[in-house]
Image: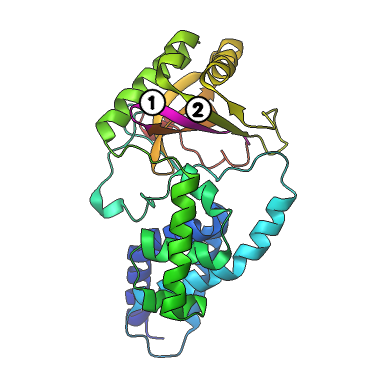
Amino acid sequence: MRQSSEARLLQEYQQARGRLVGIAHGILGDLGEAEDVVQEAWLRLRRSTDPIGSVTGWLVVTTSRLALDAVGSARRRRENYVGPWLPEPIVTFDHVGAPAPVDPADRVTLAESVSTAVLVVLETLTPAERTAFVLHDVFGLPFGEVAEIVGRTPAAVRQLAARARKHVREGAPRADTDPRRHRAVVDAFTTALENGDVEGLLRLLDPDVVLHSDGGGRVRAARNPVHGADRVARFLAGIQRKRSYRLWPARINAGPGVVLDRDGRPVAAVSLTVVDGRVARVDMVINPDKLARTGAPWKENP
C-alpha cells in the first residue's frame, strides 16, 4: 500500500473514529470493548486488498459486524457480574466542572440519544434488536444497510427496530430534552446533595424515583434498587454526610449527572433521568474499574 494511500485511510479513519466508537458502544454497552472493536476494524482496513469505495461506510459495516459478534461473550461475562450492572459512564466536563456544551459535530461521537437508562434497557434486547435500534434509530442507517449487517431482510430489520423501540419506550422514562431544565435540576440536586439536605432532595425527586447502584463487587453498593423519594433522598444524603465528597455537575452518557470525588479521585458517577422537571431515575456507578476512564475537570483544565 502506498504511503499516500495509507495516509488517506488513516485520515478518514480518524475522522470516523468517534462515530465508530459510538456505534460499537451502543451495541456492546462497554466502552473498552467498543474501542477494541474499532481498533480491529482499522487493522482489517489496513490489511484489506479489496477496492473500497467509501472508507467510512466500510468501517461502519465492519465495526457493526464485529460488535455484533462480540455481544454474546460480553453478555456471558455479565452473567457473573456481582450486583446490578450499569454501563460504564462516559463523562464530560467544561472548564468549571459543569456539563460541557455539545458541538453538533460531536453528537454522534457522544451517542447523544443513548442515555444510561436507555443503555440499561438495551441490555434486555436480543443482539439483533439492539443492533437494529442502535444503527437505525440512533445513527440513522437505512434499513437496507442494517439488513446486510445483521443478515436479515429489510422487512425483518424494520420489525426488529420496532420491537426494540417499544421496549425502550416502556423501559426507560421519557426524559426531558431541554438542556436548560436539565442544568437547573442538576444544579439544585448538586447543592442539596453537597449539603446532605434530605428536604432539598425530596423537592427534586419524583415520588416514584428509583436508584440503581453498581459496585461490581469491588466496593459496597445497594444490591437491590432503592424505590421512592424518601428512601432515595436519605440514601444519597447519608452517603454525602459520611464522606463529604466534592461534587461536579457533568454530562454522563448523553444525560445530566454529577461526579463525586474524594482527594482528587472520582468515586461515583451519578446519572440523572429528568422527567417533568424532577429526577425520575438515579443510576450510580461506583465500581472503580468503570471509573478508571473518568476524567477530572480540575486536572483537565488547570
Are dots 1 and 2 in contact, CB under 8 Å? yes
Q: To which quarter of the image does residue 291 belong?
A: top right
Question: Looking at the image, which is closer to me, 198 or 63?
Answer: 198
Q: Residues within 10 Å of mark 2 (few under 14, many from 20)?
A: many
Residue that badge 2 annotates? 209
Question: Looking at the image, which is closer to me, 297 or 168?
Answer: 168
Q: Position of residue 228 (x, y in %)?
A: 55, 23
Mark toward the start of the polypeptide (1 vs 2): 2
Q: Which residues are magenta?
A: 275-287
Asked which colour scheme the image uses, the reply is rainbow
Q: Is residue 24 above or below residue 104?
A: below
The secondary structure that dominates the magenta segment is strand
Q: Position of residue 265 (x, y in %)?
A: 54, 28
Q: Is residue 278 magenta?
A: yes
Badge 1 marks a residue whose secondary structure is strand
The amino acid beneath tag 2 is Val
Q: Quadrant of the C terminus?
A: top left
